[in-house]
Image (tube, rainbow, N blue to C red):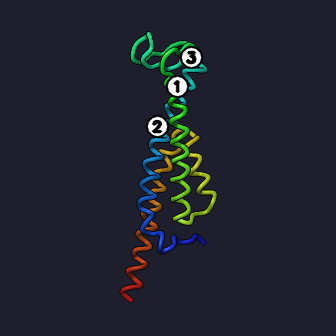
Amino acid sequence: MPLDPKPADISRIPGALRLYQVSSIITGVFLLLLCAEVYAKFVLGYELEMNGSEGFLALVPRDTVAAINLSTIILIVHGWFYVLYLFADFRLWSLMRWPFPLFVLIALGGVIPTLSFFLEGPMTRRVKRSLAQLEAKKTAEVCS
């Protein structure tokens, strides 16, 4: 039997949901950029350089970046946003009191390309539906 959120936590759920929504989109975008960067680096043999001798943005042969290495920056930014995404996932999961496998599934959204985009909508609907049911239950109790 699934557990309902604790009454004291209900007011914190919308903020946790918003953080999850924003972090899932940003993490998903950077994961796609990271996949493109890995493909360019290891298949095509190029890295993305910024403000180098080739201009503002340029693809240069692998391991020849002399200026700002955007390939590395994309990797680092995705990593830090994934940490934020895991925090948002954990916060929403713990407030909603969902089963642990759901936490793992949502966490995979930051490492499996496009999964965060597919999970964000259903998780948002699930949270909103749960909050609406709790509100209806609360209203029914007050009216009785």
Name the element at disc 1.
Answer: helix
- Residue at image location 45% in from the left, 69% down from the top: 10
Q: What's the residue type where badge 2 is placed?
A: Val
- Residue at image location 51% in from the left, 70% down from the top: 5
Badge 3 is on which residue?
Answer: 44
What x and y, as percent, mark residue 106? 56, 51
Name the element at disc 3.
Answer: helix
Q: What's the residue type where badge 1 is placed?
A: Ser
Give residue 39's quadrant in the image. Answer: top right
Quarter holding the N terminus?
Answer: bottom right
Quick one: label 1 or label 2, which is nearer the N terminus?
A: 2
Badge 1 is on which residue?
Answer: 71
Quick one: label 3 or label 1, which is nearer the N terminus?
A: 3
Q: What's the residue type where badge 3 is placed?
A: Leu
Q: Is residue 108 above or below residue 100?
A: above
In the image, farthest residue toward the top: 53
Q: Are marks 3 and 1 in contact (CB under 8 Å)?
A: no
What x and y, as percent, mark residue 115? 53, 44
Q: Are marks 1 and 2 in contact (CB under 8 Å)?
A: no
- Residue at image location 48% in from the left, 16% down from the top: 59
